[in-house]
Amino acid sequence: MNNDQRLFLENKALNLRIDSIRATSASKSGHPTSCLSAADLIAALFFNVLKHDLKNPKAANNDRFIMSKGHAIPVVYAAYKALGVISDHELLSLRKFDSVFEGHPTPRFIYNEAATGSLGQGLGVGLGMALHAKHHKLNFKTYVMMGDGEIAEGSIWEAADLAAHYNVDNLIGIVDCNRLAQSDEGINGHHVEKIAAKFEAFGWKAFVIHGHDMTEIMTAFHEAQQAGKPAVIVAKTFKGHGLAGIENKLGFHGKPFSTNEEHEAIEKLKSHFKEAYEYNHNLDLHKIHAPETTNLCFQKQQPEIKIDLASDPQAKHFGSSEKIATRQAFGYALAALGRANKAIFALDADVQNSTYTEYFEREFPDRFVQCFVAEQNMISVATGLQARGNIPFAATFAAFYTRAHDQIRMAGIGRNALRLCGSHVGVSIGEDGPSQMGLEDIALFRSVPNSIVLYPSDGVSTYKLTQEMANYHDGVSYLRTTRAATANLYDACEEFPVGGCKVLHQTDDQDIVCVIAAGITLHEALKAYKLLKEQGIHIAVIDLYSIKPIDAKTIIKVANKSHHGIITIEDHYSQGGIGEAVAHAVANENITVKSLAVQHISRSGAPAELLADAGIDAQSIVDAVQTPCGQCFERK
């Protein structure tokens, strides 16, 4: 790098610092000192390293950049202003209600690759994008900037481990090691060699540099591109670099400058970087290199995918006389989707022989990502794959999604269409005991914006609902599956639209209550229906296969013909489950709702014992209908 090139990039870095201060001061909030530590690295990336078509941010072969330390996003917005992508007015709209330039990155600004800011997730998302490039034989690279504070998150090391396992040499991490976290010094301080040693222990090539020396920065980027394995640049930087009295000092995190302080700070920067400030040559270096063209097109919205159960090689398992676990039916449907569309990917967390994603793996090993026992990273990798136009399905035990709730939450904020299957739900799993029982998952997924929550009760509905998930592109979709084999209730031609339900039993005017269930408890409800019918007592039964969105219209209609009474029964804790979903749906109606749900910590035992212990088996439903409390449903 010659002197002109160095000064050009240092001039860009100075302007990024100035504009980061201006933007955060205008918004009266933000993290200017974190932007100042990253400015040199961002200048090198955006004005020399990245190859992307600025007029087409979704171009298939663009290099990708993820600001994982999302609070420093103003310095990235400043770079896009310098590149002519956004105006100064737009830059200064940072954090305003009507602005797409939010305080932490979200896809409202189309150039942002992912929603970040909840620390520790960007590297996994970047890994998903890097795996996409490998699969499609694209030569773009993915760059992820992390803070030294956020690499204390275990999810970073889950991603680092998996990246080395798959040898993604097109993934380059950057650690902005500015020593200071929000309230104190970070766990690593300025021990950049220690950070580098950690990455190298995971199988990465690490480069330790002075993060404010442009020559070192550019050399490191060049060498990282040629590393032949995942690479990380560990840059020793200083928070608030260039501002005497603030640089490398605690107490300035998340504190914008006032109007007077802003002017003073900018003048200090001009004085500190005097040579860069005075540089005014125009170099071709500022032109971003165009990516190589490719025939692959980014598709945000895939065409509708259809699979036909009647012609499926495994159709025999879905006959009316057969039993099949819904988790296994999901595996068959997933394999069928893989045959129908090459954009389908499957991810698993070392339980593919229990979730039955192994069926997909056998047919499409190149589209199967084994994420091992690292559920947080599995969700992040799926997010990265989806952001590049793929249709990822991820599966594990429902209980283990709780540890990945933050990643799921951020996928919701990022409007990422992830398809997630949670198996082994409820106390009905039996002898494995409470640690393996998914009893919180409905509540978790119902709370995610734009999510859908589906809970099939037999093989046919599972197969059809898995297809529905593939065609849902507006957010996270979740399928809840059961461990035990259950009888098939529906013909292969039955359809299960999202937002619907199935009325399995109803009389004209004799039903004293409407029983609503899904999954394993629907089969208990059907047993209870027969027991009560033998006693001359009639109940309506609804299969609530779509918990969110919920078919309130049908529920209200059936309940009103069932003496205005509902009993819900679910293999889930009462908080956030089916009972609460139904109660909310009928809240403004003259309808009484009684909920049977798991109320205490379960234990090891036979499934039938545990269903009875939880009060959610067939006899419990019969008792609920017949008890004095249940008699309120008999009012005329």
Image (cartoon, rainbow, N blue to C red):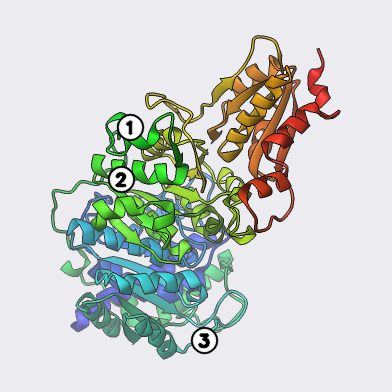
Q: Are marks 3 and 2 in contact (CB under 8 Å)?
A: no
Which of the labelled discs sits on residue 189, or is there none? 3
Residue 309 circle label: 1
x and y, in percent, of residue 269 in the image: 44, 77
Percent x, y for residue 626? Answer: 80, 27
**In front here: 199 or 491?**
491
Residue carrying label 2: 335
**Residue 83 appearing in the image:** yes
In what element is the residue under mark 2?
helix
Instruction: For marks 3 and 2, give the CA distance.
Output: 48 Å
The answer to whether the residues at label 2 and label 1 have Cβ atoms under 8 Å apart is no
Residue 248 place in picture, x, y as percent: 52, 84
SS under mark 1: helix
Question: How many other residues sit within 10 Å of disc 1, few (<14), some (14-19) or many (≥20)?
Answer: some
Residue 19, visible in the rendered structure: no
| Of pointers 3 and 1, the one earlier in the residue sequence | 3
Mark 3 vs mark 1, CA separation in Å: 58 Å
Front label number (3 vs 2): 2
Which residue type does callout 1 highlight? Leu
x and y percent of residue 15 in the render? 37, 69
Q: Residue at x 46, y 48 (%)?
A: 421
Q: Earlier in the sequence, mark 2 or mark 1?
A: 1
From this view, report whether residue 488 is shown above or below residue 288. Answer: above
Three-letter amino acid code of the residue under disc 2: Ala
